[in-house]
């Protein structure tokens, strides 16, 4: 039977243990550097196209390769996290994407770059599931949404950091040095190994084999929530990756070709400002979701994001464009904060990291088609026109959540199953 707790409105950080803060720091930094390594490619697409004499379609495929590989990484490291521990899995995933990013800087062809992007994707796919499981199992239910919102806000930090790194290195030392900077996350693993403990929930949970984990997830009552979560997460990520993979290129594309015609410094400033909006989106989602519920918050963010995209593309007034850029980033990105708590509250400890990693990165793999779709569509409609496609994906995510996602606010994490439909209208 589902147990609930009263939501405590005191500051989420008050009275927490040193171990909880160490887990928070490990997940936050791991996620920020994870996103930095993943997004650097989006910032150097123009340089890569020019050096390898390629086009936007092929560059979009290279971006998609990393997202597809993240599904394999989520599955692999999710199983490892449930089998050998959240901390060990996190360390291995961070090392993987750090090595892959450095190798990207050594690429001599688009084919080689695509291969190394696969390595990056595998590592990136594993870090989120392990980190999310560790945080949700270490912090209490009454503040889970807010804590995960702050952890998820590292996404905006990583995105902005990628823009700054590229702005510093690309014009002077070349785009490859932006990738070489990606070795930095490997140093984080030394701190994680020394200062982060395993969650007590994992220590006590049954350790399942691969076959048992699949059986637990798909041969019991968890299949339905799994596919519901996969569906709405996929739709949301199609919107996100289609939009934000190409935003840097859109800002730098000449006006005659459907872009904004900005130089590197101007587009970098815009990206950083947009990530300030995204940061507020991540944080606000957690607070709103802890107050009114996961379902209503997801729906609101998806719908507003869908409305903002065409407005942003068609506005001409610079001040209004900047305002809507921030609003679009806030709602078009902030929903990510809801994934970790929602998934954690729907699945038991022994398959939690596996389910979270599988859903999150499976969705990211399917959404890998979005950068390619926008890239190829831009040849006919221009970059700006192609970006409006993403609004439909956000609306689809809202529809799926409205009809099928159960409400999970304030659920305590459990070892046993529960009926996902019992609190749908919560």
Image (tube, helix red, strand yellow):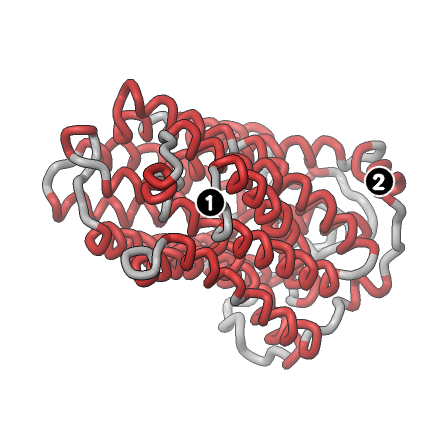
Q: Quadrant of residue 112?
A: top right
Mark 2 vs mark 1: in front? 2
Q: Is residue 395 left or right of residue 349?
A: left
> Residue 363, percent across and down?
58, 36
> Residue 426, percent across and down?
58, 43
Q: Quadrant of residue 52?
A: top left
Q: Does 416 appear above or below 53? A: below
Going from the N terminus, do you reach mark 2 or mark 1 first?
2
Mark 2–mark 1 distance (CA, rounded to whole Å): 29 Å
Q: Is residue 56 left or right of residue 23?
A: left
User: Mark 2: which secondary structure?
Assistant: helix
Looking at the image, the residue that sits furthest to the left is 317
Residue that numbered label 2 is attached to: 216
Q: Does 298 appear above or below 383? A: below
Q: Does 93 appear above or below 251? A: below
Task: Say the numbered circle drawn on residue 264.
Answer: none
Looking at the image, the residue that sits furthest to the top is 380
Q: How busy is the neighbourhood of tag 2: few (under 14 within 10 Å), some, or many (20 plus)?
A: some
Q: How busy is the neighbourhood of tag 1: few (under 14 within 10 Å), some, or many (20 plus)?
A: many
> Residue 320, percent across and down?
15, 44
User: Mark 1: which secondary structure?
Assistant: helix
Residue that numbered label 1 is attached to: 297
Foreground residue among 27 and 56: 56
- Measuring 48% from the left and 31% from the top, which residue is drawn there? 61
Foreground residue among 273 and 93: 93
Could one spot residue 143 in this view of the protein? no
- Measuring 57% from the left and 63% from the top, which residue is drawn there? 30
- Measuring 24% from the left and 50% from the top, which residue is drawn there? 267
């Amino acid at each position: 039977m589902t147990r609930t707790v009263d939501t405590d409105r005191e500051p989420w950080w008050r009275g927490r243990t040193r171990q909880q803060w160490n887990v928070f720091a490990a997940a936050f930094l791991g996620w920020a550097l994870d996103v930095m390594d993943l997004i650097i490619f989006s910032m150097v697409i123009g340089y890569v196209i020019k050096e390898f004499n390629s086009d936007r379609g092929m560059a979009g495929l290279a971006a998609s390769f990393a997202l597809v590989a993240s599904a394999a990484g989520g599955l692999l490291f999710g199983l490892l996290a449930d089998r050998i521990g959240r901390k060990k899995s996190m360390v291995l995933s961070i090392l993987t994407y750090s090595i892959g990013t450095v190798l990207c800087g050594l690429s001599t062809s688009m084919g080689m770059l695509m291969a190394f992007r696969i390595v990056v994707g595998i590592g990136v796919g594993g870090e989120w599931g392990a980190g999310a499981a560790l945080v949700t199992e270490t912090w209490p239910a009454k503040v889970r949404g807010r804590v995960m919102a702050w952890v998820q806000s590292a996404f905006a930090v990583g995105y902005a950091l990628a823009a700054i790194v590229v702005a510093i290195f690309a014009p002077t030392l070349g785009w490859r040095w932006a990738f070489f900077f990606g070795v930095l996350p490997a140093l984080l693993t030394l701190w994680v190994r020394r200062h982060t403990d395993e969650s007590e929930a994992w220590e006590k949970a049954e350790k399942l084999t691969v076959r048992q984990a699949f059986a637990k997830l798909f041969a019991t009552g968890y299949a339905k929530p799994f596919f519901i979560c996969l569906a709405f997460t996929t739709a949301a990520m199609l919107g996100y990756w289609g939009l934000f993979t190409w935003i840097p290129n859109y800002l730098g594309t000449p006006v005659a070709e459907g872009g904004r015609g900005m130089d590197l410094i101007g587009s970098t400033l815009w990206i950083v400002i947009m990530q300030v909006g995204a940061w507020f989106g991540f944080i606000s989602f957690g607070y709103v979701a802890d107050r009114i519920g996961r379902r209503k918050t997801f729906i609101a963010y998806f719908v507003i994001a869908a409305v903002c995209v065409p407005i942003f593309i068609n506005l001409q007034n610079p001040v209004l464009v900047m305002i809507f850029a921030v609003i679009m980033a806030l709602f078009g990105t902030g929903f990510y904060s809801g994934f970790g708590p929602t998934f954690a509250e729907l699945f038991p400890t022994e398959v939690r990291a596996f389910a979270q990693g599988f859903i999150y990165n499976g969705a990211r793999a399917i959404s890998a088609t979005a950068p390619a779709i926008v890239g190829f569509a831009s040849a006919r409609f221009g970059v700006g026109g192609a970006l409006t496609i993403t609004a439909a994906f956000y609306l689809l995510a809202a529809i799926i959540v409205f009809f099928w996602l159960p409400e999970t606010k304030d659920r305590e994490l459990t070892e046993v199953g529960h009926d996902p439909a019992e609190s749908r209208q919560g």
